Amino acid sequence: MIECSVNGILLDVEGTTSSIGYVYDVMFPFVREHLAEFLKQEWDRPALMGACQQIAHDAGAGSLAQWCGGNLEPSHVQQLVHDEVIRLMDGDVKATGLKQLQGLVWRLGYDRGQLKSHVFEDVPVALKRWAKDGLNVRIYSSGSVTAQRLFFGHTDAGDLLVYLRGHYDTTTGPKKEATSYAKIAQEMRYSPEEILFLSDVVAELDAARAAGMKTALVVRLGNKPIEPGHEHPTIESFDDLVVTRG
C-alpha cells in the first residue's frame, strides 16, 4: 500500500487504466478495417482535413498540398493518407496527426455502438473516490484528446468523464520529456510536487519525476516486462493507493 498526499492525479491510459490488449487487439484493428470507408465518407470535413494537414506536417511537409506533390484529387490524397496511417501504425509511431485521425475513426465506432472501452475493475471505483475527495484527476495520453473523451465516455463501466477535469495529448508535448509535465502542472495551477502521475512506462515516470511530480509505476496483467533498476514505487491496482488531499 502506498500513501500519498497530493491535490492532483495525472493518469496514463494504455496499460494503466485500460489493458494494452484492448488497444492493440480491438481499437487499432478497428481503424485498419474502417479507415478507407471513413476517408471517403468524411472527406472535406474540417476535423478530417485538419488531421490530414497534421499528418503532412508530421511527415516533414509544409502543407498537405506539398506532401501530395500538388495532386489534390481526393482519391489520390485519401490513398496517401491511408498508406501513411497504416505505416505509422505498423511502426507504433506516436505521431500527433495519426492520433487525431484515429480518434475520428473511433468516434464512428462509438457512435455505432461497435466499440466499448475496457477499463480495469478498480478504475471506476478509484475515479469516483478521488472525485468525491476533491482531487483533480486528469488524463495524459499519446491518444488525442478527442479519443480520450470518447474512450472514457463509453466504457464497459459507463460514462467516466464526470470524474475527469482535463485531458492532455502530444500537442502538450512528448510524454518522455520533463517540460511536458511542467507545462501540465502549470495548467493545473499546482506545483509539480502536488501531482501524482501514474503510468506503466518508466521513461514517462522519469520525465514526470524530473519535473518534480510524484510518481508510481502501474504493473498490470499483460503489460510489457519492466527493466529492473527504476526508482518508482510500484502498484498493481489503484486499490494499492491511499491518496489524500495535500
Image (spheres, rainbow, N blue to C red):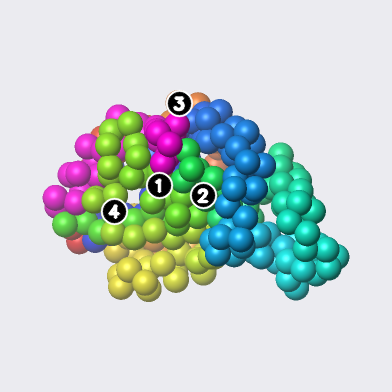
Give the residue type that dot 4 points to.
Leu
**Sequence-wise, which precedes: disc 4 or disc 3?**
4
Q: Is residue 165 visible?
A: yes
In this picture, residue 14 sits left or right of residue 96: left
Label 4, residues with CA under 10 Å away: few <14, some 14-19, many ≥20: many
Is label 1 in contact with label 2 (beta carbons under 8 Å)?
yes
Q: Secondary structure at mark 3?
A: loop
Dividing the picture into quarters, in which one does residue 71 lie? bottom right
Distance from the alpha carbon under mark 2 to that under mark 3: 25 Å
Is label 2 in contact with label 3 (beta carbons under 8 Å)?
no
In this picture, residue 107 sits left or right of residue 48: left
Label 1, residues with CA under 10 Å away: few <14, some 14-19, many ≥20: many
- Which image quadrant: the C terminus? bottom left
Q: Is residue 230 magenta?
A: no
**Sequence-wise, which precedes: disc 1 or disc 2?**
2
Residue range (magenta): 110-133
Distance from the alpha carbon under mark 2 to that under mark 4: 18 Å
Q: Position of residue 37 (x, y in %)?
A: 63, 41
In this picture, residue 20 sits left or right of residue 149: right
**Sequence-wise, which precedes: disc 4 or disc 1?**
1
Label 3, residues with CA under 10 Å away: few <14, some 14-19, many ≥20: few
The residue shown at (56%, 55%) is 100
Distance from the alpha carbon under mark 4 to that under mark 3: 24 Å
> Depth check: 234 or 175 in front?
175
Q: Which residue is mark 2?
A: 103
Distance from the alpha carbon under mark 4 to that under mark 1: 13 Å
**Sequence-wise, which precedes: disc 2 or disc 3?**
2
The residue shown at (58%, 52%) is 42
Dividing the picture into quarters, in which one does residue 87 lie? top right
Relative to 84, is 21 above or below? Answer: above
Q: Which residue is mark 4?
A: 164
